[in-house]
Amino acid sequence: MIDVLVKYLHWHYFEQSKIILLAWKNLLRFNLEYFSIPTLLRTFLWPWRKYEDSFTKGFDLLKVLEVITFNMMSRAIGIMLRSSLIIMGTLMEIFILFGGLLIFIIWLIIPALIVIGLWLGLKLIF
């Protein structure tokens, strides 16, 4: 009986805890890749979908202002969309971080909860 209890506690606190921590780490990494946060930060000031207008030969003030306005609008759209994706990805990362921490803490106290539940159940019976 004691041997089974020791094996269970070893499995619960060492083997399975490592697997839970590895899964938690994988979820955090997946979220970063899913939302492409490093790439979005690296390309933060780039125009949206690389939509850019270029200057033509010759000087036409109206065309120059049009090109500058279009390029600035494209960059502004890119910044807004990338910002929203970065914020959503960061919020999900925080949610996964705290959710994983909560799950891991609950996993660690499950044996104590089982013992307390059995003790309270037996106390009600007797």
Image: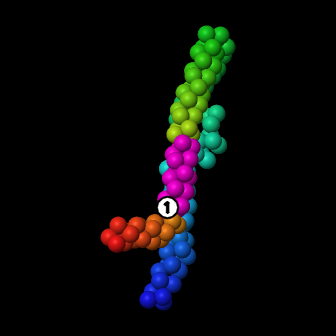
Q: Residue furthest right?
A: 59
Tell me the kind of residue under disc 1. Ile
Q: Would you place residue 50 above or below residue 34 in this image?
A: above
Residue at image location 57% in from the left, 43% down from the top:
90
Front-lying residue, 42 or 90? 90
Q: Position of residue 30 (x, y in %)?
A: 51, 55
Q: Position of residue 42 (x, y in %)?
A: 64, 43
* 93 horizontally vs 125: left or right: right
Q: Position of residue 67 (x, y in %)?
A: 60, 19
* 3 horizontally vs 53: left or right: left
Q: Would you place residue 10 above or below residue 23 in this image?
A: below
Front-lying residue, 91 or 66? 91
Q: Would you place residue 12 above or below residue 76 in this image?
A: below
Q: What is the crowding at mark 1: few (fewer than 14 residues within 10 Å), some, or many (at least 20)?
A: few
Residue at image location 47% in from the left, 80% down from the top:
8
Tell me which secondary structure the magenta stretch mostly adopts.
Answer: helix
How many numbered badges does the structure rendering display?
1
User: Quarter of the image containing the C terminus?
Assistant: bottom left
Residue at image location 57% in from the left, 22% down from the top:
73
Scheme by which the image is coloured:
rainbow
Q: Position of residue 102 (x, y in %)?
A: 52, 56
Front-lying residue, 42 or 50? 42
User: Quarter of the image containing the N terminus?
Assistant: bottom left
Q: Which residues are magenta?
A: 89-107
Determine which residue is flagged by label 1. 106
Residue 50 appears in the rendering: no
* 41 horizontally vs 26: left or right: right
Residue 72 magenta: no
Quarter of the figure with residue 25: bottom right
